[in-house]
Amino acid sequence: MRLETRKLLEDMRQACALVHGFTAGKTLADYQADALLRSGVERQFEIIGKALGRLLRTDPQTAAQISQYRRIISFRNVLIHGYDVVEDEVVWDVVQRDLPVLHREVEAFLALP
């Protein structure tokens, strides 16, 4: 695996872990009530999406093996450019449903030699 690929995957892994840590033991209501928590989670999703976008440009074969990679990149773009239409429920659903899958996939890639 190329060094740049490994670095981008590691950036994604770290961001996934941070979101998990930020949201552990939290509920949607906690998330909605805490502007700092929302900002932190959204920032990590921005990092994930940007790293995956760079991975798509530098190593499209690896990026394409990440489930819903285009959707993840699009989600980042909504967070950045459509900040005024971001719905807390959607972000929370991504945290609960999609982030664990991405985290497992990224860790599996990083376990490869």
Image (cartoon, grey):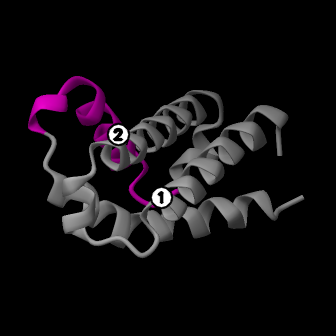
Residue in the image at 27% along x and 35% along y: 79
What residue is disc 2 on? 39
Residue in the image at 31% along x and 61% along y: 94
Which of the two residues, 49 or 63, is positioned nearer the viewer here? 49
Query: Horizontal placement of 87 versus 38: left or right?
Result: left
Q: Which residue range is magenta in the image?
A: 66-85
Which of the two residues, 110 or 37, is positioned nearer the viewer here? 37
Residue in the image at 65% along x and 36% along y: 59
- Amino acid type, mark 2: Ser
Q: Quadrant of residue 45?
A: top left
**How far across and how far down the image is residue 39, in percent?**
35, 39
Query: Horizontal placement of 36 versus 110: left or right?
Result: left
Decide whether the magenta segment is chiefly helix, strand or loop. Answer: helix
Q: Is residue 28 visible?
A: yes
Q: Quadrant of residue 3?
A: top right
Q: Secondary structure at mark 2?
A: helix
Which of the two residues, 42 or 94, is positioned nearer the viewer here? 42
Q: Which mark is residue 64?
A: none
Query: Horizontal placement of 94 versus 108: left or right?
Result: left
- Amino acid type, mark 1: Phe
Q: Is residue 65 visible?
A: no
What residue is disc 1 on? 22
**How far across and how far down the image is residue 113, in percent?**
90, 58
**How far across and how far down the image is residue 105, in percent?**
59, 65
**How far across and how far down the image is residue 14, in percent?**
64, 50
Mark closer to the chain start, 1 or 2:
1
Q: Secondary structure at mark 1?
A: helix
Do the numbered discs 1 and 2 sit on residues whose CB atoms are within 8 Å?
A: no
Residue 30 magenta: no
Marks 1 and 2 sit apart, C-alpha to C-alpha, by 11 Å
Q: Quadrant of residue 67?
A: bottom left
Badge 2: few (under 14), some or many (20 or more) residues near its Cα, within 10 Å? few
